[in-house]
């Protein structure tokens, strides 16, 4: 893995137009992802900085490179199932793979489920889109654009 010097700001179109994402800092172990949101009631913009481990980004990208074809769309449940099976998250939680996949949205409401989704899926997917490796669509599905080696 090579690490380039941090870019000033890399912005991408947010999912469903509700937020923007920028990479604001990079080191050899993690990067800082800045998510911009608009408050539903006040309409004011605010941001949240999230630390994303490079190893989690590499994990997801390698999983997608092994499991997906370039130019084909894959839904969030397909990707989530691959993550669960590879990381054995269902065993950690004492549930079946099917249960975790079927309760994907419901699982997000539980803190531990939400932690898994952001750590292994949502945040790494945002970084990979910002870097041009894939395109995110709909409710978190994606399409690989390239299978080139990952360079942060």
Image (cartoon, rainbow, N blue to C red):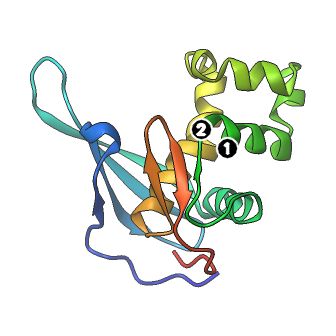
Q: Residue 106: horizontal and vertical position, in percent?
A: 60, 15
Q: Nearer the viewer, residue 144 or 54?
A: 144
Dot 1 alpha-carbon crowd within 10 angstroms: few under 14, some 14 to 19, many 20 or more:
many
Dot 2 alpha-carbon crowd within 10 angstroms: few under 14, some 14 to 19, many 20 or more:
many
Residue at x 81%, y 23% (from the top left corner): 98
Q: Nearer the viewer, residue 66 or 94?
A: 66
Label 1 sits on residue: 79
Image quarter for residue 19? top left
Residue at x 45%, y 50% (from the top left corner): 136
Report helix, strand or loop for mark 2.
Answer: helix
Q: Residue 4: horizontal and vertical position, in percent?
A: 46, 84
Residue 82 higher or lower than 110, as above or below: below
Q: Is residue 43 left or right of residue 139?
A: left
For the residues bearing labels 2 and 1, Cβ distance under 8 angstroms: yes
Image quarter for residue 40? top left
Extreme front residue here?
Answer: 72
Q: Residue 12: horizontal and vertical position, in percent?
A: 30, 58
Residue 93 higher or lower than 21, as above or below: above
Which dot marks residue 14? none
Q: Nearer the viewer, residue 129 or 27?
A: 129
Q: Residue 10: horizontal and vertical position, in percent?
A: 30, 67
Of the 4 image quadrants, the one containing the N terminus is: bottom right
Q: Nearer the viewer, residue 1 or 62?
A: 62
Structural distance between the alpha carbons of marks 2 and 1: 5 Å
Residue at x 10%, y 27% (from the top left corner): 43
Report helix, strand or loop for mark 1.
Answer: helix
Which dot marks residue 76? 2
């Amino acid at each position: 893995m090579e690490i380039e010097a941090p870019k000033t700001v890399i912005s991408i179109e947010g999912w469903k137009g509700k937020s923007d994402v920028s990479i604001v800092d990079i080191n050899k172990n993690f990067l800082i992802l800045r998510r911009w949101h608009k408050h539903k009631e006040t309409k004011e913009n605010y941001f949240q900085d999230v630390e994303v481990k490079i190893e989690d980004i590499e994990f997801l990208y390698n999983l997608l490179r092994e499991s997906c074809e370039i130019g084909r769309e894959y839904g969030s449940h397909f990707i989530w199932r691959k993550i669960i099976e590879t990381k054995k998250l269902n065993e950690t939680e004492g549930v079946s793979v099917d249960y975790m996949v079927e309760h994907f949205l419901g699982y997000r409401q539980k803190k531990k489920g939400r932690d898994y989704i952001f750590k292994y899926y949502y945040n790494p997917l945002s970084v990979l889109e910002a870097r041009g490796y894939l395109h995110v669509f709909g409710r978190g599905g994606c399409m690989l654009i390239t299978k080139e080696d990952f360079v942060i």
